[in-house]
Amino acid sequence: MNKALAIFIIKSSIFLILSCKKNNTCTFSSAELNISFIINEEIPKNSYITIDNRKFVFTTDIKLINNQHMIPSDKFIIHKKGGEKPIIEKNSNIYIGISLWEKLKKQNEYILISPSMLLTKGALKIKRKDNKEITISIPCELKKNLVIQTKALN
């Protein structure tokens, strides 16, 4: 591994660890963000991602997905009438990533740097059109479902 890359990964990891505050929220800023969704564990209920003061809440309710502030969780729960057992449909990391990008794209403030990463891995690599830093906040418990890599301003 390249020495500069190793140092970057270590600094990013330390920054993410140090960014966890008493209110159990991890916040950091970067000129460029790479957000990868990992669906090994259930996304905790009421989890969210805040990007530049815009809060996106994970939902398991398929009826709410068109709301501008909702993004799909690791699964949808489709409730049947008459008290029958609900249907649970698992979501892919690609679907979650694309859904978040569609919401961000409507803001007309962000550039998708690597569309191929989004379509193949569900990883969002973005930067602001005005080249300002992006600030992101998540509940610290969501770190097991997200990998967030940062790149400093040049």
Image: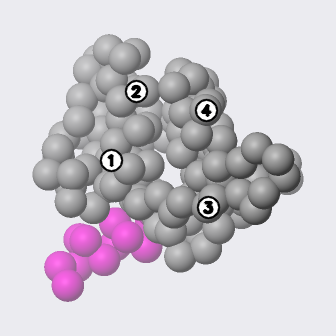
Q: Earlier in the sequence, mark 1 or mark 2?
A: 2
Q: Is residue 96 visible?
A: yes
Q: Would you place residue 87 above or below residue 126 in this image? A: below
Say which amino acid is labelled 2: Leu
Say which amino acid is labelled 1: Leu
Q: Earlier in the sequence, mark 3 or mark 1?
A: 3
Which residue is identified by label 4? 63
Say which amino acid is labelled 3: Ile
| Mark 3 to mark 1 CA distance (whole Å) | 26 Å
Which residue is identified by label 3? 88
Q: Earlier in the sequence, mark 4 or mark 1?
A: 4
Q: Secondary structure at mark 3?
A: strand
**Mark 1 packing: few (<14 Cα in 10 Å), some, or many (20+)?**
many
Residue 53 lies in magenta, yes or no?
no
| Mark 1 to mark 2 CA distance (whole Å) | 10 Å
**Foreground disc of the pair 4, 1:** 4
Which residue is identified by label 2? 104
Residue shown at the point (50%, 68%) measured from the top left = 39
**Foreground disc of the pair 4, 2:** 4
